[in-house]
Amino acid sequence: QWNAGIKQGKMATITCPAWMTGLIQTAAGNDGAGKWDIASVPGGGGNWGGSFLTVPKQGKHVKEAAELADFLTSAASEKKIFTGPTGSLPSLTDALSDPAVQGARKPYFNNAPTGQIFAASAKGLRPSFRGTKDQQVRIPFANALQLVEQRKESPDAAWRKALADAEKNLKH
């Protein structure tokens, strides 16, 4: 449904991390070129997590796996991945300031200056604390937003339900 909504132009906006630009482009297809744009979110961006690489000690090729992890997370690799079709944002601050990243644009998205937009957002992030009860609170609010989006609840009713559900979850 999500891809169909994008392709049919039924979505006005999408909260979009850098890596999602490739998914949107794939979902919208060639007909979507120039119909999408990218802008900074008012009030600054956020972060919902990330990706991690590990090399288990009991692996068969530990040395090679560690070398691959080092290669994939180097500033040069992160820069190349961001400026390529996937668009995953570098996690290294040095890479965010690199001229190739800063100068990156996405022709499909009205030639948006994605390097400047996403790098500025990442540099402006403040650490946030996610407590041990994050799931118990976050899920009811995500559900409430979905109810409002689907026009199954009013914003006020969804808010009250989210508060009640979160409170109930915290007591368990």
Image (cartoon, rainbow, N blue to C red):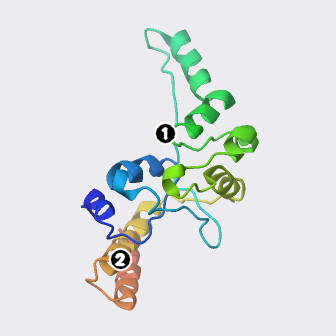
Residue drawn 38% across the image and 58% down it: 32
- Callout 2, which amino acid? Ala
Residue placed most toward the observer, 18 or 163: 18
Q: Are marks 1 and 2 in contact (CB under 8 Å)?
A: no
Q: Position of residue 169 (x, y in %)?
A: 36, 70
Question: Which residue position is annotated with label 2?
Answer: 144
Residue drawn 45% across the image and 51% down it: 20
Residue placed most toward the observer, 168 or 64: 64
Question: Which residue position is annotated with label 1?
Answer: 85
| Disc marking residue 132 | none
Structural distance between the alpha carbons of marks 1 and 2: 34 Å
Residue placed most toward the observer, 73 or 99: 99
Q: Position of residue 12 (x, y in %)?
A: 41, 72
Residue drawn 53% across the image and 50% down it: 107
Position of residue 61 relative to residue 171, above or below, is above
Instruction: Tell me the quarter of the image containing the N terminus.
Output: bottom left
Position of residue 167 relative to residue 54, above or below, is below
